Structure formats: structure tokens, C-alpha cells
Amino acid sequence: MLSDNVKTQIRTIYKAIASALPNFRSRREQNYMVAEISKTLAGEYDKHRRIIVVEAGTGIGKSLSYILGTIPLALASKKKVCIATATVALQEQLLHKDLPFFLQHSGLDFKFGLVKGRQRYVCLAKLEMLIGGDNGMQMAMWQTKPDQSQVDMLQTLLKDYHEGRWNGELDTLKTPIPDHLWQQIACDKHSCHRQNASHRNCPFHKAREDVDSWDVLIANHSLLFADLELGGGIILPDPEDMYYVIDEAHHLPIVARDFSSAQATLRGATDWLEKMIKLSAKLQNQLKTTHIISPVQMLQDYAADLTTLLNQMANYCDTQASQFANSEGRLRFEHGKLPDVIKPLTENLATSSNLALKQFNKMQSVLTEAIKDGELPKHQADTLMTECGFMLQRLENLAKLWKMVAREDNSKGAPLARWVEQLTGGKQVDYLWCASPIEVGFMLESMLWEKAAGVVLCSATLRALNRFEHFAHQVGLSLNDGSRYLALQSPFDFENNATLYLPRMRTEPTDDQYTAELAEHILKLVEDETATLVLFASYWQMEKVVELLEGKLKQLLLVQGSAPRQQLLEKHRQRCDAGESSILFGTGSFSEGLDLPGDYLTNLIVTKLPFAVPTSPVEQAHAEYIKLKGGNPFLQLTIPDASRKLVQSCGRLLRKEQDYGRITILDRRLVSKRYGASLMDALPPYRRVIE
């Protein structure tokens, strides 16, 4: 139950914040969201299922709501808060604006910070090996032969770190470093050995010591899943001791699915397996202990078996050349079922890769003990640990893939999507084997929902067709499992501030002449308008319209892909500030997270309903699974997804209460098709003009 002390504390803080914010307006929706979050996490509705799903429309102030609804309760309950977001922009807003403001005016004493993955920190051992030490090893570490400027850059980094001018984080570099170069010096879990003296000064581990003292942790969705996959409590605090706030939660199903997938090549794997055998032999030669002999010999046997099996699978794929040719280089196994002829091969690959992984871990344990006992010089120890780290990462991935490929699917759940992609262009054709779950709800239930002290899932767009069912199913929740669901309407005056316009059109998107008609309408719709954003469903159609409009517009178009996104947006704002007309062209990624308030956007044009074509193997497998169960993929997947995306697209127009403008949708299927009414009903109550 929520104690009276916490209730009073929340009210007091709210009043203090209201006094500190200029032009603050108390909103019933915001107050309700704060109260419902606190009561849910305190167990007032369900002691065992402390989960609340909140769709909070633009303008409610959801960040302040979940901060106020979680932090006072967490501090009183001796728990921590983890706020996980999908975008860097929201992380920075929380870190530099929202949480400092809350700390200043709440009267609470708490610490907070941004938790980053290992790959955001430099590995000092790798950095030192790349720029010095044994020349043979140094050159082997480089992916390509370095030029002197790269070596100089790394030497400067090392010097800046040791002299206190740099803390070892990628995000604090004064001069950006090329991605391929950073990947070679970034920290990773496999080559890390804290016992070594140099690792006690490791930037990553020093940052982790700070994390332990924080009460509120900001993370991204990927880092959250990295921790959950390890069982929780490894990177972040234990789930049982933490309230999770998952903001931008509509990304959660895709992030979870991608994080749970695996892929590996066949012939490429045989190449690094050969290097792994050589590495194990080097370990046996350099370590004095006899404990290394057995795991090395067994590892070499299993690696040899793996090489034989991978070559057999590659030979099988070679015999399927016609199928790859007929499917644009991709072979997907219907319903996830493998041909009988390769089932034993996949099972053997799963067994051998798992056994090889076990022996590699034993071998690395022996190495770690030898380093701990001081049997190896520092440089030699760092070199061996780094080489082992590279190999272990690959071997873990290989074992994960073949375990997924070979396992029997549960008859009660969705099968895995399994497919192979043909890779050409090298000396020899190779094949990329892939496996991915279709649905991830069961995984989220076991990894997070049943473990966490409490969870808040929120976003401006979670419902599809005005209902939570689609999202709940995607993330493994249901409407009657004890979880709470809250839909809060935006305080904006949609009817008076925005017009939804559907002009009369000759064609629909399925017509060959549709693109030409799009160009005609856009030309008219941008006339005498200062700030326009046109959203396209595909790059192809956007480029075609650009061609058709060439020479017909007074101003130069700002087209996605022609320059970095931020540069395009800055140019757009500059034109608007100067009183010039500006037109932005973008695709789906511009329909989310794009913030152009006030006079920076008054004319929004949506060219086409955002129907996703199931082109990826996972999407195809999902549609196939729904059909198998007697369902309709278009109604169960495509329409709900399009509804949420259309709400997001239209949401670009009104970002603040005083904003105004027109939304034009150039897709008559909204009125000509039966499903159109449902899509229209899910939109905010704009003033409607339908020709």
C-alpha cells in the first residue's frame, strides 16, 4: 500500500515544481498518471503484478509524471529506479534537464546517472597493444594496415587518458574517432580480466563503481536486454530491487526480438575456427600448468568436428543454388521446419558448438588463474586475454545460433523463424544462417515481468485502433492478468488547432498513376505555405516525386538522405526563422521523434497509409504463423501497426498547445475501404474536411 507519508511527499513535491516552472498548468491527466503509477508500484491493485501500461498523449508531461510517481516511492521502499529509453535524445533530456530539475526542487536526496554498455568505454589493454609492444601482434590486431595518422590518434588518446584530459568514454571525445577504429579498442566482456592491475584503472569498471551508488539509472533498451539475458542484476541492479520505467515502450517488441536472434556464416566460421585451434596451441605452449592440456586437446577435437560439419552444411547449401536464385538470395524454411535431410546435421552442429564452448571456457579459466597468480608478464597476459575474448564472442554466437536452429519448436507457441542468406562477392560463396523468435512475450514474462519489483511501460502511442490488446500481446501481457492499463488524452485542442484534410483523388496507392498524382497534389499543397513536412512510405516513391517536381518549385527541397538529419532540420529552421518557405521530404523515420513546434511546421502531408509490407523473413514467418492458426495477418498485424504509425505521423504537427496547422492525407483508402473508418477513429479529433 502507498503510505500516507509518500502521498504527502508527492503532493508537496508537485506543488514545489509547479511554483518553480514558469507558466505551469496543473493537468488532471498528469496528476492521475502520477497517482496511478505510485499506487500500482505500491501494490494497491495487485501485490504480485505491479505493472502499469500508460499511453500518455503529447503535452501531458509523461517524464515528470513517471519521475514523480516512482522516485519518492523507490527511496521510501529502499529500491532503485531504472529508466530505459529508445533514443539518445530522451536520455540526454532526462540526464541534463528533467532529473537535475527534479533533484533541485523535490527536496529529495538521490543520485542519478547514465549507464552505458562496455562498448562505450575504451579498453586500455587493447589500446596499448595497438600502438606498441610486440610488432607482430600489433599488426595482427589491426583489421587493416594503419596509416600514421591513426597511430598518432590512438597515442594521443592514451596520453590524454593517463594525464586526466579524457575519462575513456566514447561520448566525451573532443575529436570523433572513426567507428572501425573505435571497435578495435572498445571494451568487451570476453577479453576483460579485472585481476590485472591495469584493469583496476579500467574506465568501464571505474564507471561501474559509480553506478552502484546511484538511486536512479538511465539506460537504453539494448542495455536493459543485455542485463536481462544474463539473468538480471549483472549490469544493472537486481530486478527484484528495482522499479523499471520503460519509456518509448512501443519499440520494446522489436528490440526484444532482435536481441534474441542469432546469425553466423558457414565458411567464414571455419576460417576463425582454424585460428582458434592455433590460439589454443599457443596457450598450451605459454602456460606452464598441466591443467591446460585436457581442455585444449578436447577443444581442438570439437573445433575439427565443427569445421567438418560446417563444410557439410555449406555443401548442402551449394546444392540449393536454384532455390536461392528464385528467392533473391534468401531461403526461408516455411513454418520454421527444416528439411529432414539436414536435421541430424543441425543437431550435431548444436552439440559440437556447445561442447567446444564448454572447453573454451575451461581453457580461459586456466588462463585467468595463471594471470591471477602472476605467471605471465602483463603484455603477454593482455594479448592472450584479448585474443581469447575475440574467439569466445564468436563461439558463443555460433553455439547460440545452432541451438536455436536445431531445437524442437513448442507446439503451443510460435515457431522460430529460420532462414539462410547467400553471400556472394568473396573468393567463394558463403551462407549466413539466421534464427529469430517470432513472438517474444513469453521471454519478457520470464525475464522481466515476473522478476521486477514493478514496471511502468509508457509512450505517446501504445494503442492500436484505440485498444491495448495488440501491444499487450506483443510484450506478453494480457488485459486480465492484473496489469493496469491507462490511456490519457492529450490536453491539446485538436478540433480548433488542426484540420485533417482528405482531398478528392483520381487514384489510390495501388494505381500506376498514383505517384504522378502525388506530385500534382504536393505542388498545390505547398503553395503559399511556410513550413511543410511531407512523409513518404518509401524512399523509391519519395525520389520519384522529387524528380517529378524538379524545376516546378521556387525553393530547394530538403530531402532525407541528401544530408545528415540534424543538418537538414537546422537548415529548415533557419529558413523558417528568415521568413522563407521550407519543404522537408522524409520517410518513416521522420514520422517519429521529429520535433518541429510552432511555426516550424504548419503543413503536414502524409502521402500514404503506413502499411508495412512483410519483406523480412521474421515478418513473413509471423504472417505465416497467424494464417496457420486460422487468423488474418492483415487484420491482426498490418492494420494495428498502421494505426499506431499513422497516429505517430499525424502527431508531428501539434507539439505544443498553441501549435496549429493542417494535416493532409493523400490516401483515399481511409474512406473507400472498410478498415479506413477504424483508422480514422483512432486519430485525435481533428476538424475534418473530406472531399
Image (tube, rainbow, N blue to C red):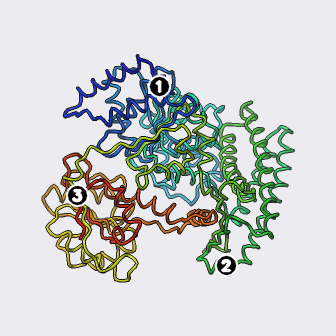
Amino acid beneath label 1:
Ala
150 shown above or below 210: below
The Cα–Cα distance between marks 1 and 2, rounded to whole angstroms, is: 57 Å
Q: Residue furthest top?
A: 5
Could you tell me which secondary element the residue under label 2 belongs to?
helix
Q: From mark 2 to mark 3, how far is it between C-alphas? A: 53 Å
Q: Within the image, what quadrant is residue 564 found in?
A: bottom left
Place residue 331 in its image quadrant.
bottom right
- Name which of mark 3 and mark 1 comes first in the sequence: 1
Report whether 432 appears left or right of 508.
right
Residue at 43% x, 51% y is: 463
Residue 464 position within the rendered picture, expressed as x and y whole percent measured from the top left: 43, 54
Residue, disc 3? 687
Front-most of residues 40 and 564: 40
Distance from Cα at disc 3 to Cα at disc 1: 43 Å
Query: Circle 2 is placed at which residue position?
Result: 323
Per the image, the residue denoted by label 1 is 74
Residue at the spot x=61%, y=75% of the render? 329
Q: Secondary structure at mark 1?
A: helix
Rendered location of residue 333, percent (x, y): 68, 68
Classify mark 3: helix, strand or loop.
strand
